[in-house]
Amino acid sequence: MKIENAKAQMRKGVLEYCILSVLSRGDAYASDIINEMKEARIIVVEGTLYPLLTRLKNAGLLSYRWEESTQGPPRKYYELTDRGREFLQELDLSWTELVNSVQFINSKNQNHEESSDH
Amino acid sequence: MKIENAKAQMRKGVLEYCILSVLSRGDAYASDIINEMKEARIIVVEGTLYPLLTRLKNAGLLSYRWEESTQGPPRKYYELTDRGREFLQELDLSWTELVNSVQFINSKNQNHEESSDH
DNA sequence: ATTTAGTACTATGTAATACCAAGTATTATT
DNA sequence: AATAATACTTGGTATTACATAGTACTAAAT
């Protein structure tokens, strides 16, 4: 069982949240998003990102417009819809709950570890 | 797009980590694990848990023994192997990294939100 | 002008896991 | 003996991350 695989599974469901979060600051096209995520040390690849953006658009959470580029082919700029912003808030809560849940589970172990340190 | 589905996706890859964490305190059988997780407000259902436990056992991270019960049918008690403990530490790191990454992405938004609060 | 390179996006198939539902098996209770 | 509770097994569905191959547009090189 590989840790890389475990990491990829952990990313499932989180990427959507991160992408909505990135877009909540303002519109961006795919490479922007990839770079923002990379800066946060979350690697997301094209084969994942594009279908994900499409799903979010189809779900009404994103909208996009085409924009000519001076540096190459035209780009698809995405931005959050109002529904996207609402959903992002729900994801905020869900993520926080999950993090707290994991922490709760781990805290029982740390209490044990701490007592053996003392 | 349903928040419940997003939550389930977020749980992907995390359940394994939580289960290993629960078992790091000592052996347990399936219902124990379900209750520990429920206490932490992570709902995991049998159809998920049993195959997951089997996968972890097949990967050498868990071992189990059968134990008669005075309250019903016999139970399968699982415990971490040495490899399981090592893997759990790697998952600890991976989870922490992911949490930090998400926080990093969100921090850029919170800075924006904070400045508009002031 | 043509070819090559870089950039951006699309589509498809694979792998993995959470979940639902149905079922089997063992023991306790009625 | 029949029913209920408990514990585990099995198989199918849905979803998403990823790898890969390809198309399309523009810029740079030839």
Image: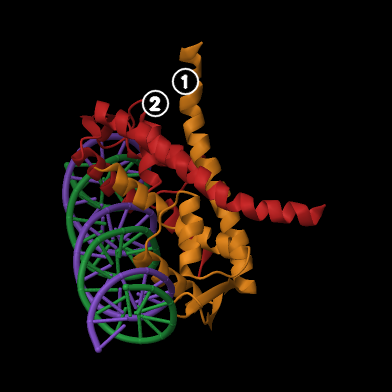
Chain colours: A red, B orange, C green, D purple
Mark 2 residue element: loop
Among the 4 quarters of the image, the one containing residue A64: top left
Among the 4 quarters of the image, the one containing residue B84: bottom right
Q: Position of residue B30 (x, y in %)?
A: 46, 69
B50, above or below B111, in the image = below
Instruction: State whether residue B61 appears in this view.
Output: no
Mark 1 residue element: helix
> Which of B29 and A61 lies nearest the eye of the viewer?
B29
Separation of disc 2 and disc 1 at Cα?
A: 8 Å
Identified by mark 1, the residue type is His
Q: Residue at x 25, y 34 (%)?
A: A62
Q: Position of residue B115 (x, y in %)?
A: 50, 15
From this viewpoint, which residue is outermost toward the top?
Answer: B118
Instruction: State whether residue B69 appears in this view.
Output: yes
* Residue position marked by numbered label 2 in the rendering: A25
Q: Residue at x 43, y 69 (%)?
A: B52
* Residue position marked by numbered label 1 in the rendering: B112
Dot 1 crowding, Cα within 10 Å, few <14, some 14–19, many 20+: few
Q: Position of residue B86 (x, y in %)?
A: 63, 66
Contact between marks 2 and 1 (CB within 8 A): the answer is yes
Are discs 2 and 1 both within one chain? no
Dot 2 crowding, Cα within 10 Å, few <14, some 14–19, many 20+: some
Identified by mark 2, the residue type is Arg
